[in-house]
Structure formats: structure tokens, C-alpha cells
Amino acid sequence: MAQDLDLPQLRQRLASGDGPAFWRSLDALAGTEAFQAYLRTEFPGAVPLAQGPERRGFLKLMAASFALAGLSACDAFDGRGREVPYVVQPERIVAGAPLAYATSALFDGFANGIQVTTRNGRPLKVEGNPDHPWSRGGTDVLGQASVLGLYDPFRSQAVQHLGRPAAWSAFRGALLARLAVLRETGGAGFHLLTGPVTSPALAAEIDRLRSAYPGLRWHVSQTVPRDGLYDGARQAYGRPLETQFRFEAARTLVSLDGDFLDVGPGQVGLSRRWIDARRAAQAEGRLLTLHAAAPTPGLTSVKADHTLAAGSDDLARLAADLLRIAEGAPPQPVAETADGPRAAWLRRAGAALLAARGRGLVTAGIGQPAAVHALVHRINGALGNTGTTVVHTAPVPVSGAEDVSALIEAMAGGRVGTLLMLGVNPVYEGSGELAFAEHLARVPFKIHAGTYFDETAAHADWHLPLAHPLESWGDARSLDGTVGLIQPTVAPLYGGRSAHEILTLFGSESPEPETPAREGPERGLGLLKRQWRRPGEDAAAFEARFAEALRLGFLPDTALPMESVALTGRVADPVPASAAEDRAAADRIEAVFRPDPCVWDGASADLGWLQELPKPLTKVVWENVVAVSPRLAERLHLVTGDVVAVEANGRRLEGAAWILPGQAAHTVTLTLGYGRRVPDHLAQGLGYDAQALRPAATPYRLPDVTLTKTGRRARPVTTQDLGTMQGHDFVRVQALGAPSVGDPPGAVVPSFYAAPPSAGRGAASADAGARAGRAWGMVIDLDACIGCNACLTACQSENNIPVVGREEVARGRWMNWLRVDRYYAGDLDAPDTHFQPVPCMHCEAAPCELGCPVEATVHDSEGLNLQVYNRCIGTRTCQSYCPYKVRRFNYLDYTGGMAPVAQQQRNPDVTVRARGVMEKCTYCLQRIAGARIDAAKDAHAPIPDGTVETACQGACPTRAIVFGDLSDSSSKVAAARRDPRNYALLGELNTRPRTTYLASLAPGAEPGREG
Amino acid sequence: MAQLFAPGADALLRLALLSGAALIAGGAVLVAGIARSDYVTGVGIAPAQPVPFSHKHHSGELGIDCRYCHTTVETQATAGLPPTQTCMTCHSQIWTGSDMLKPVRDSYASGEPLRWVRLNKLPQYVYYNHSVHVTKGIGCSTCHGDVTTMQMTYRANAFEMQFCLDCHQAPERWVRTPDQVWNMNWSPPANQATLGPQLVAKNHIHGGDRLLECGICHR
């Protein structure tokens, strides 16, 4: 870890050009002993062995997210097992055949179109829905992991009354007595608390409830609110609006802490639109330049071509300056020399925007206050971008709800008699300032419905299990307004009910008799049909239309219409601080709050896949850290791992510091989603709870905090140095108009195997001409990779990759087959950042194959480097021979003893590996084999390009990964290989990797060519 | 000083060494023998089933096609086991009162599935696909034996790797014309030596090289 690094010296080394061009951590830059150990071996001895996994923690892990014991349970009977056919074969279910349903994954209430593959009735894998107008086939980490959430044994499994198991009928009985009173009083004192609602059906249900109880008050609680966006539009246009981007019309992009590539409800759709526009620009020889300024690096700002680290105050001033430039006035002078990075960034961004009048795009993210959003609207207006690159629609979430503070006020006043908390966890989610739990104690009848028995459930009188989205009916809108349908892929595993169904329990309609859980989904379907049947529509016509919508997964043409907008009169600019104030502010430390890029708001924090997913920039797993800038670390003599106390307004939290290159000098970043307090859950006690410090009024920022060293040291577990390779030019950057940095054409020989047999190694065959002659290969476009990790989660889901736990990761025993390396280049304070996904290279001349004493790793004639688990004896020689360090070893029995319910998620087409066995990326061999068998049955028809899609490729929202047959010159992958940007990683070793990369793009020296 | 060892000690030592070696060798043979025995591999052993279903009667005597019950054998990896409903298509009309068929009727009435004892099982790291084998001309009886003679069904072959490799090495010895795939008492015709290679070429079967690659069966 970064201990006792001499930061000024590192900075000097970089400035002098003496340091490495690309570096993956501060340790790497300094060349510390610890880093050298990572370089020499995959599992460095220099990582002190942590304590053995604590038994309790280990058991928790096994219950949650470990892999299976196969069907060994069935083996128990006379050693043969049983075969159990259906009694009546259900329609459409063919034993063993995959069956996919189109549905929607929910992200903070917003929908992304997905397809869920089921086998024998069990949902196994989430794929993108290519027909969905918003998500266009991409997925994100939360969507991919939702299938694990379905089986999660931690999910709430029963109705509970005061912490004791009860029945739905008991709740119904208690409720009926209560409802009688409420009906008399017109619902006075009845409050409903939900998350953001985009679902028209749920909104209709709430409306019905409101008409039954006119006194009902509805509140919305959200950990990651989008209020800044809507309030900003209100300031600029007089009403709340959703902003939609048309990247394809843009020539230049300016992001003021924008987040269109960051994990969030918009990531899947927006990143796809961005990369499509960037690729179209590249085809025309342009670069769709992105200028980004941000207080803390995020996926959007690190992907930018021109990045600036700017504190929140400075960001507001930058927005004001850009507005002045847009209006033709000079920017306000600030206390910085004209050639400083800020001035240079502003000059460049301003010039680009002016040059691209009407075709520029300025954006700000959820983390920015309304004032900055209002300024952004005005900049876009002044430049004529509004209506071309930036259009507006009505807000997607249903309006009409009050906020949580109104509820707190009512609770404090004792005016809340009945509180239904539907799918929210306000005790954890709310700002610590609100002290929700204390006020909640004053409510006489409080009901919590959630997928977990969480912090709020523990404070409620009644807890109701909420059905998982993969087992309920419903609908939700995407960020563009498209209505996605949600259909169950399996009957509720734990007897949960959907939010719609729970609301109907409160309805005024006469209560139907309670019947077992099977009736639940039927009722959900009825509600959904009631919502979408047009008045007077013929029943048969509706059924046909609805069936088609279910097949598609969405209702076509439901995107919200564009609204015409006009800027309202100018209110005063937010007053930019004067130079003197600036200097005073220089010593002040601000804290910004950001959702976690893996677990987001913490609602899915019990999923081991998400916990073990390295955060895109820090590569930290299983916890959150306090990100500090290198400057601040120098000033306070901090090193990574120092436990720091962050204090403000009499409240404090403690977390491990992390020196984050690219962080604004006086900004610390606190991430949400950790510090969960649910007993015995996987997420309990991991990291710190940023809510303790979070102000209710400005949820993303605290302008003044104190940061002190506690003197203790923690050891945040990171994977950033795992898989450090020896060599150079790992990532390459292609400047526009510069000579090609790719491998010269012909340097990468397409295939050993398509060549005559004499050229191949021992591939002698009598009928080489008749063989299929396929040569599988992969090309990864580094320019498109945004580091979002969707590929990792998809791979984990497809290939039964175990979760190993924090202690094992600390020992370097992280198991994911695919890693995304993050490299920095240049200045410590404002580095360029590059992501590089590294799967197995499937080298044609694979070093690993030379080392294996039992030939457990061998080549096949299609160029796949196979790993034969049942041959492997665990010498790990192959691992030490692999220059790419992509092989993973099962040091322990990571897959045994997993909860039976969670075993059901496993892909039956992929072997579950045992202890002592080496494993690695197979190019999704099971998918290739499936396509091969289909082709073989079809008279050996060629496999059409695109038939085989690897899991990582299918998940990628920016289509950065291309896979296919290199011997077919018309295939997409062969075309990608012909791209002049194509290069082989460590090609100088002559391993002839089948996986190659396309160099990242950068602005050229000629300024005219970029937008 | 008296002799420590009697004159016969040498002989005893030799005997002990020899018998020790013989024991080790014999033990190895015994272990290997047991591992290959029908007792362990289950070959030829017909376990008690919930219903004493006879392939001999249904498939042999009545001539019901394999695919009437094993419906997915031509399209899926697994051949498929018939749902209770399939049994009842006939047995709601004939032998409706038979004691032997009581479990079938009970299953259909109660919705509780029949739980058959599994006969053929591969290790979990082996992926076998029925559909591609029957499409390419490998008949049922090559692996499952002549079930038309089995009163109670048993495993006909120990599905060890050698068994699979024998065929993947030289498929021309086993491949049949499409009309013979379902023939349970098929034996190689006299012209198999010429017919086999023709069928192999026609069906694009790459025995001996492609089919011996690990990734064909192991994933």
C-alpha cells in the first residue's frame, strides 16, 4: 500500500519526464517494494497474510454468494440420484432449453430494458434487450447482479410483526381495523413513503388510494436525489424538466461534473448514444471532444479528452465564466495565472463551444446544485444548443409527492397515525441530520415493505416482504420516458408481493379473500392490464397488443414528447467569489457525496458480486474510502490507509483515506451505500456511513469540513496492482492526425490454424480443407471502454465465478476472469485515465501450455486456449508462465457449501470448479459449443457472424468488445483487426494473442480537427 | 556371541519382501478391478423404480418409437423424460385398474411427479448433447444397449472417458444411416468398412482430431 510515499518527489519525477508514461498506482509510480512484489508474482508474498477468514464472516459469505455443491444433494439416494419429470409438461418449457423473457431492470425507479434467460423455469442470466429504444442492448452492473438478488437468501422471507414471523392474513386483519378508522377520518394522518415512482401503474394505484383517503400525504425518499436537475430547470425555464441529450448532433461536449457515463439510471442509454456519436465523428475524421471539469473523478470526467479538477465553488464559477463567454463577454479573472490549467481548460472549452455554436452540448450532473444547472441551461440557450443537442421533456418521475422533511415535520408534530414505507429504507437512506428513526418511534402504526429486513424494518411494527422485480408484474419508465414492462420470470420465491399488490390491500375496494401466494402475480397482471387497456378498447385487440408489448418488453412509442422551452428572465448570477475570498477558501476543505459506483445507494449491498467488484477508479473492494487529493495528502501528511475523521456541524465519521489522482485539491469525496447496520447481513459493518455527515438541504456537498488523522491505519483492500504486467505500451493512445500507433498491418498474423496444417503446431489432419477452420478472436476498443464493470458482473454471472471475500482478495486471490486495468498517465493532480479490460488473450503461442505437466491447458483447432479442469492438478505453473496474469486459482473450496437457493443461479452449461483447480476466461466456450452444435446439426452450415456473443460483449453498454471468427474476413472482429489502431498487448513476446486492442483516441496537435 | 538370525532368516525376509510386493500389486489390481466392476459402474444393474416400467414391452413388443416419450432427443442436449401425462395418454384407456400403474395414476391425480432412479449419469464437467449425436448418425443402442430386450432397464455401458473416446477416435465404426439410428438391435453391416467413412464424410464428422479436443466435451 502507499505508505510513506514522497509525493513531491513523484510529482517532480513525472514533470521531468523521467517516470513511466502509464502507471496504475502511486506505488507503481514510486516503484515501492510492495509493488515490485506484485510485478514479480501474481500472489505477492509481500502482502502480509491477513488473519484467516473469521468463521462467522466466512459463513455469511457462503450463505450469500458462494457457488454450489452441484446437484450433489440429489445424489444422496443410493448413489444414483433421481430424475424427476413434470406431471404435465408446461407449455413452452423444454427441459434444458433456454427461454428468455423481456422485462425491465429497475435503477432507482428508472427502467432499463433487459432479457432474462431462464432454464427449466429458473432465471439464470440477464442480457440486454437490443430492441429497447432506451437501453439498446446494454446493461449495467446492478442490472446484471439483479439475478443474484433474486436468489439472495438474505432477502426478507416472511411477514413480521414486531420482529416475529406472522402471516399475510394477520397483517390484513390488523390493517382492516386500522383502515376502518382511516376511512371515517378521510385518511387524516395517513402517510405513504415511496422511492421515486416512474411507474404509471403504481402512480395510478397511488391516485386511487388518494381518492379513497383524501387526507393521504405521499412522500418520496431517495438516497441519490435528482432534485438539482429539476430545480435548475425550474430556475431557467419556470418548470421542472428532464434534459435529454442528442450527442449525434453535437460537435463538442462540455461537462461540468456531468455524469452521463457514470453508473446511474441513465448510464446504459446515455453511454451508448455517446459512443455512437463519437464513432460517427471518428468515421468523419473528427473527434467528439469531451471537456470535463469535476471536483472528484468519475467515469465521465476521466473519459474526457480535456480534464480539469475543480472544487465545487470553482465549478460554479466556471459555469458562470462559460456563460459569459457564450454571451460574448470575457470571463471573470480569477486568482490564477493565465497559463494555469484552469485558464487553459476554460479557454479551450469556451473556444470549442463558440466554434460549434448550436452544435455544442453543455451538461452538469446530479451532484451539482440547481444554480449550476440553471447556468448550464442558459449557456446552452445562449449558444443555440437548446433544441438541437439538448432537448427537454417533462420529468420522468411522477410528480405530486412531498419530500421527506415534510414527513419528518409531521412525525415530529405527532400528526402521523399510519405510515406505509413502500420499498424504501429511510432510517438508513436519510441524512443523519433528519434522525428519521427517532421521529419514527412516535408513529403508532408503521408498516415497512421491502425486499430486505433492513434498518427501517427493525423500527417498524409490521414488515412485509416485497417481491423482487424479477418475480413481479409492473411497469416503469426509462430516462427517455419509454414505458418498460416488468414481467415475472419465476413465481415469488419467498412469498413476496409487489408494491402494486401491497397498495391494493389498502384500497377501498372490498377485500378479496386471502389465498396463497400464487394468486399474487395474477393480481399484479390484472392491475397492469387495467392500467394499459385503452378506454373502449376491444378485449381481444388489447390482449394482442399487450402480448406483443410483453414480447418486446416495452410499450412502443411511449417516449415523452419534446417540450418547447423558453428561458425566463435572468435572476442574479450566483456571485462568484472574489480573489481574496478565493485565497481564504483555499484552506477550506469541502466534502462531496457521491453514490458508490458498485453498490450505488447500498440497497443492493448484500450482493457479493457487487461487493467484490473493484470500484472503477480506486479498485477498492468490500468497502468505501475517503478520497483525498495528492495535494491535501501532502498538506496533512496523509498516506493511503490512514484512518481519518471527517467532522462538520458536530457530527463525524471515520474512514480510510485514499489518495486519488485527479481529485480537486481541497475536496474529499465520501461515498454512499456503506456502513449498513443490519445484523448478520453481508454488508453489515463494511466501510463508513456517509449519511452521518450528509446535510439534508444540500445532499451532495458540505462546504466546510475538518479532516484529522486519527493515527490509526486501515488496510483498504484493492485490486489495482493485481495482474501487474512486465513490459511497456500496455495502453496506446492514438492522437487524431498523428502517425498510427497500432501494430503495422501484417504484424498480427490472423491465425495459425486457418493456415495449411504444416504451418500449425502438430495440427496434422488428413482433411484440413474440410474442417470448419474457425479462428475465434476478440477486439476491445479502449476508446469505447468507460470502465463501468458491466462486463465483469456479466462474466461472473455466466461463468459461475465464486465470490471469495475480503480477506482472500487481500491475499490476491480475486477470482474474476476478466479484470479492468486502470492506468494513469501524466500529472499526479490531473492525470489522463485509461481503462483496459484484460481477459485471457488466447495466445496462439501460449506460454501457459508449455508449463503444464499434465497438459491440462491445451489448444483446440479453433484457436481456443482450453483449461481442462478434470486434468488440472494445481501446480500453478501455467499461472507463473502467463505474461498477462489472467489465470485464477482456487486456493480454497470457494464453491462448496453455498445456500441451496443461491446455487440455483448457476449456469448449468459451465463446470463449477473445485479446490485446487486453475481457471480462466474461456471466451464463453459454452456459447461457442452451443453455436457449433447448432451449426453441425444444420448440415455444417457456417456460424453467421454475431451468433456467438460472449457474456462480456453482450453486457457492454458501449459495445467496446467485438468477438467472432477472424478467418471470416467479412466478420466484425476481422474488420476491427484491420483498424489501424489495432495492437496486441505485449505483442513483442510473440505470443500471438487472439485478443487485441484498439488504441484510445485523443485530440490531435492540430486544434482545427477537434470539435 | 550367539547368532542373531537363524539360518532361515534370509529366506523369511525374501518371502516377506516378495509377498509385500505381491500384496501391493494385487491390491492395485483389486482396486482397479473393483473400480471397473459392474458393482461400481452400475452396468447391468436394474434398480427398483417407482413403476416397474418395461422397455422390452413398450419399445420391443409394442414397437413404440423412442421419440414418443424421449421427445427432445433430436433437438436438445437431453433426450427428455416423459411427463406423467404421456403415460396417461394410453393408461387412461388401458390397464386403468392395474396395481402396477397406481403410482402413475396417483401422480397424475395429485400433481406429485414420479421420481425415477437415474441410470445414466456423466460427471458434471462433461457436457453430452443427444441431438448432435443422433443427427450425425449415432444410434441410441450404441450407448444405451438394446433396451428392447430389457425387462427392467439397466445401464448398458460404463460411461467412462475411454468409452466416449473409442467412438470419437473412429466414428466410422459406429455411424449409421439415418433410418438405422432408432434401430435397437443394429449391428454393423457387412459393408461398414466402406459405408462408415462415406457417412463420416457426408456428415462432416471429424473423428480422430477435432472430436478428440478437450473443449468438445469439457467446458
Image (cartoon, coloured by chain):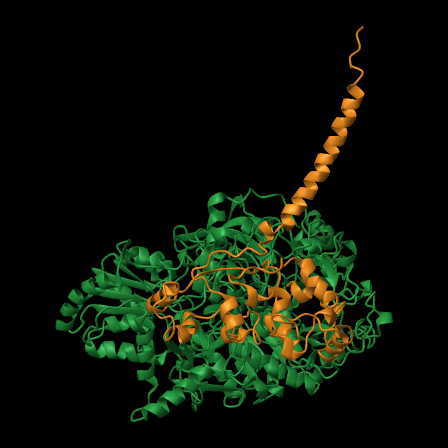
Chain colours: A green, B orange
Q: Is residue A573 left or right of residue A870?
A: left
Nearest to the observer: residue A713 or residue A858: A858
Nearest to the observer: residue A431 or residue A962: A962
Indicate the quadrant where residue A975 lies: bottom right
Indicate the quadrant where residue A619 lies: bottom right
**Which quadrant of the figure contains the C terminus of chain A?**
bottom right
In the picture as drawn, the residue positioned furthest to the left comes out as A184
Nearest to the observer: residue A29 or residue A220: A220
The answer to whether any part of residue B54 appears in the image is: yes
Report how many numbered discs are placed on residues in the image: 0
Asked if B134 appears above or below A851 in the picture, the reply is: below
In the picture as drawn, the residue positioned furthest to the front comes out as B61
Q: Is residue B110 left or right of residue A30?
A: left
Q: Position of residue B161 (x, y in %)?
A: 67, 58
Q: Position of residue A931 (x, y in %)?
A: 63, 75
Q: Is residue A341 left or right of residue A316?
A: right
Asked if A116 appears above or below A11 in the picture, the reply is: below
Asked if A1008 appears above or below A346 in the picture, the reply is: below
Q: Is residue B107 left or right of residue A311?
A: left
Asked if A670 appears above or below B39 in the picture, the reply is: below
The answer to whether any part of residue A416 appears in the image is: no
Q: Position of residue B13 (x, y in %)?
A: 77, 24
Q: Position of residue A143 (x, y in %)?
A: 49, 70
Q: Residue at x 50, y 90 (%)?
A: A387
In the picture as drawn, the residue positioned furthest to the top comes out as B1
Nearest to the observer: residue A651 or residue A713: A713
Indicate the quadrant where residue A491 lies: bottom left
